[in-house]
Image (cartoon, coloured by chain):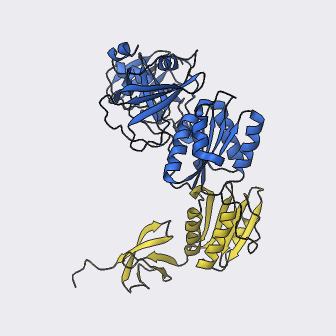
Amino acid sequence: MTMTALKTRAHPAVEGGLQLEVTNVSLQTESIISITLADPSGERLPSYVPGSHLVVQYGSGVNAYSLTESGSAPSEYTISVLRVEDGAGGSVAMHRLSVGDRVYVSRPRSAFAPVSTATHHLLVAAGIGITPVLSHARAAAERGIAASLIYVYRPGAGAHVADTRELLGPGLIECTDRGSFQKVLTEHLTTQALGTHLYVCGPAAFMDAVLDQARELGWSPARLHSEAFGAAPLDEGEPFTVNLVRSGVRLEVPAGVSLLETLEKAGRSIPNMCRKGICGECSLSVVRGAPQHRDLYLTDQEKAANTTMMCCVSRSEDPELELDL
Amino acid sequence: MRSVSMPPTACTGLEPGFRGVICASFGAAGDIAKQDTGGRPRHDLHFASATPNTLSDLRTVLGASHVGVRLVLAGPQADIRAAAAVAAECGLLEEEVTLLSDEAGPRVVYCPHCLTTTIDRAAGSEVECQGCATVLAITDHFSRRKGAYLGYSAHAEEAS
């Protein structure tokens, strides 16, 4: 399978990245596997910030997966992948990988970093959301920083449970039902010493609920950190026209094709990383028109200003947008 | 977790785990009483000035309070800046601290030559360092961590 994958061109999202070999595949649960990747010639891999992710190519598509180790001087990268039967096909392709296969991956990307001044990390994870949070827990243990973890999973379906027990000891609270989680969360949100920061990863609705409750209990936004791995797939959107005012070029952006892809097809190279509206790399200046903001990067205030847009996911409210390109 | 055996906060009357608004005033600052806390529980503290002792009291109070708490500091610049530096050390974020400063008032100037701070009461452009007697030119460069303006040896580059 990967033999053919490597014959295809590297996807723009993994360009300038690494070509790694699968060195181990192990079963975490019935539907989650851990995949270990290493450099085929045994070179050490780039270090990464805890909570970073890797973009992995499968066939012609790419998916982002959180790295689960602490990230300091790694000789291998480990990701854990939940098999999603009705997804875009990435996780199913990952589950077909076997030892010896080669894959294109990006360099690690950090969008969920721990705060260096925090004296305590309160980690909250649901389901496969454990992966970046496990990286945080490992890094905290290595650096001697206090961490606790509230981990919600369905009985028998929790990945890395043994790892987290060993790492956190009494600092781990496992919840297998909603009621007990709610009680534990409220108790933790109201009893944290002032140096505490909160990190949450899980399904979008879960994260929203945790973050909403934290804000209600007086947590300021700068203490709250979330990893939007489970961003719901965006709809195709309406077609629109972009006018690149500096180069005098007009391009049509059809429904189902992103502005970033349209610009790339027209030969423009736009710096970009996640292509999911998270990292902020593909930011473009808008001269005229109102973008339909669909990213998770800009603040509400920045979105309202309509002067900047993330071209990987955002589209246009107006039939035409003018860009400073 | 620090919540178990905190030193008694009886001296300040704050219950452990407080998550309301702490209003600390220094000197004769009066308008803090009008500060609106949006219906949240409020705890008032008053100090004559920011000294190692009073700052240590503030540290004790902040050590006993929990995430969710807000701090309002009122009084002369030098005092509330010193208190804000303590708040940051205790883990409060900038957006959780409100500073209500008296417009005029002495400034604290940091001497990079001997690492001491001097209070400038004259509001001039220079002050003599109380640590090493260097005449310091006072810059606009302010350190939130030290709660002080950076000074440097005045006229050092002039031919004598």
Judging depth in this view, the residue of A166 and A305 nearest the camera is: A166
Horizontal side, residue A37 vs residue A233: left or right: left
Measured from the top left, where is residue B101 in percent x and y? 60, 70
Q: In this structure image, what is the colour of chain A?
A: blue
Residue A272 vertical placement versus A113 (above, below)? above
Q: Where's residue A198, x and y in %?
A: 61, 46
Report the front residue among A242 and A152: A152
Q: Is residue A285 visible?
A: no
- Quarter occupied by the C terminus of chain A: top left
Q: Going 50% across and 40% down the picture, which residue do you hit?
A: A51
Q: Quadrant of residue A177?
A: top right
Q: Vertically, is B89 above or below A18?
A: below
Letter of the yellow chain? B
Residue closer to the observer: B91 or B71? B91
Give the vertical position of A320 relative to B157 (above or below): above
Residue A181, quarter of the rendered image: top right
Where residue B104 appears, x then y in whole percent? 55, 75
Q: Quadrant of residue A3?
A: top left
Q: Is residue A292 above or below residue B153?
A: above
Quadrant including the N terminus of chain A: top left
Residue at left 67%, top 27%? A156
From the viewer's perspective, tell me whether residue B64 is left or right of residue B115.
right
